[in-house]
Image (spheres, rainbow, N blue to C red):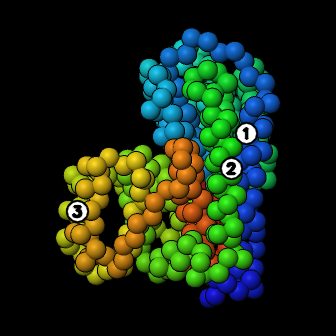
């Protein structure tokens, strides 16, 4: 398989995932405009935030938490379940996020939040969530349909961030958003199919991961990025992938590198780093790398790019998205369909 041969890419990318990835910076720009122009109630007396969402619709909440947790004065909780925490009440801002509008876990959580008289904002393209929100007079932030949920991260994430900004719960993010879009547009030139493997970092990583088990370790502020890489490698590349975060992994997982040498020699470790990592985290990464390097089949470091935290997060998210695409091509599989998830949903619908 030749990642620099357009015919090889076209053969397996039947749903044109490459086009969706190439369009991602522009999607982020459109998402910001949509969120800024959407009608929004003047919710007041908010003392906590809950984001409900699953899979591709839920990762935006994880990234949001990373972006705002160091400045927001309110606790932000992520829920990925049918139920919501008992402490949710009428002073809670609840985001019900479902790209399709039919995610059963999110719909269940929505009903519970409604019973608790929470201040709800629905983010969706339509479906049952939209119909319920209209019936219940809950504000809806409508986003464009027709994409796989995991390929709509721009719409799903920036809807959350801009809404918090407009409600006065976080500081103005206009400059950070503009710089992030600008950086992404620069990076797509480097990661797109027209960029040859020798100069394309995303293609290079995919080639190293091919026929190996990807493990993604991150510094604390990049934990949501590790989850995104894991999810994209699973859904796009159709491979198992695992992620963990320093320093927690040093208190348990690091011991797991002692046995099963045959499996460990098929593990490729990627450590995602940020230049603002604390000195102690940097030291932990250095020591851990020495321990693992001789046991894994490979180990690489990749640093975030950009000035603001928002830029730095999305620089690595975008890299991981392209890596998962190229690995799918190497695996000889279309990255877009998720047949197992579709089957699971059909079986669940039978009840």
Which badge, 1 or 3, comes first in the chain's sequence?
1
Residue 11 position in % (x across, y down): 73, 82
Q: Tell me: 295 left or right of 48.
A: left
Label 2 vs label 3: CA separation? 35 Å
Quarter of the image with the N terminus is bottom right
Q: How many marks?
A: 3
Residue 29 position in % (x across, y down): 74, 46
Q: Is residue 252 visible?
A: yes
* Disc 1 residue crowd, few under 14, some 14–19, many 20+, Cα 10 Å: many
The answer to whether residue 338 is above or below residue 221 is below
The residue that label 2 is drawn on is: 181
Quarter-wise, where is residue 53 in the image? top right
Residue at (63% x, 48% y) in the render: 180
Which badge, 2 or 3, comes first in the chain's sequence?
2
Q: Tell me: 147 left or right of 81.
A: right
The residue that label 3 is drawn on is: 287
The residue that label 1 is drawn on is: 32
The answer to whether residue 20 is above or below residue 51 is below
The answer to whether residue 67 is above or below residue 12 is above
Residue at (76% x, 52% y) in the render: 26
Foreground mark, 2 or 1, reads 2
Residue at (55% x, 72% y) in the render: 201
Q: For mark 2, give the secondary structure.
A: helix
Asked if the residue at tag 1 contacts the one at tag 2, i.e. Cβ–Cβ closer than 8 Å, the answer is yes
Asked if the residue at tag 3 contacts the one at tag 2, i.e. Cβ–Cβ closer than 8 Å, the answer is no
Quarter-wise, where is residue 252 in the image? bottom left
């Amino acid at each position: 398989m030749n990642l620099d041969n357009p015919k090889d890419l076209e053969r397996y990318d039947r749903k044109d995932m490459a086009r969706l990835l190439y369009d991602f910076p522009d999607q982020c720009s459109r998402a910001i405009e949509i969120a800024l122009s959407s009608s929004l109630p003047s919710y007041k007396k908010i003392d906590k935030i809950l984001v409900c969402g699953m899979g591709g619709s839920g990762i935006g909440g994880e990234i949001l938490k990373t972006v705002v947790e160091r400045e927001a004065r309110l606790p932000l909780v992520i829920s990925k379940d049918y139920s919501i925490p008992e402490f949710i009440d009428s002073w809670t801002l609840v985001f019900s996020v479902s790209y399709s509008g039919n995610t059963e876990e999110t719909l269940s959580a929505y009903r519970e939040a409604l019973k608790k008289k929470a201040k709800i904002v629905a983010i969706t393209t339509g479906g049952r969530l939209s119909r319920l929100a209209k019936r219940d007079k809950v504000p809806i932030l409508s986003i464009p349909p027709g994409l796989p949920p995991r390929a709509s991260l721009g719409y799903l994430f920036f809807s959350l961030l801009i809404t918090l900004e407009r409600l006065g719960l976080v500081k103005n993010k206009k400059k950070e958003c503009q710089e992030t879009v600008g950086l992404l547009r620069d990076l797509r030139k480097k990661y797109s199919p027209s960029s040859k493997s020798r100069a394309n970092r995303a293609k290079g990583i995919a080639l190293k991961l091919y026929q190996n088990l990807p493990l993604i370790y991150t510094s604390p502020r990049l934990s949501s990025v590790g989850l995104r890489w894991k999810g994209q490698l699973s859904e796009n590349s159709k491979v198992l992938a695992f992620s963990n975060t320093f320093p927690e992994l040093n208190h348990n997982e690091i011991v797991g590198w002692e046995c099963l040498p045959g499996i460990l020699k098929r593990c490729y470790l990627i450590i995602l780093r940020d230049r603002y990592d604390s000195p102690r985290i940097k030291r932990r990464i250095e020591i851990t790398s020495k321990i693992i390097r001789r046991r894994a089949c490979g180990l690489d470091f990749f640093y975030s790019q950009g000035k603001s935290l928002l830029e730095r997060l999305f620089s690595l998210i975008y890299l991981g998205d392209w890596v998962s695409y190229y690995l799918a091509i190497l695996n000889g599989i279309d990255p877009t369909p998720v047949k197992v998830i579709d089957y699971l949903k059909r079986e669940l619908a039978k009840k």
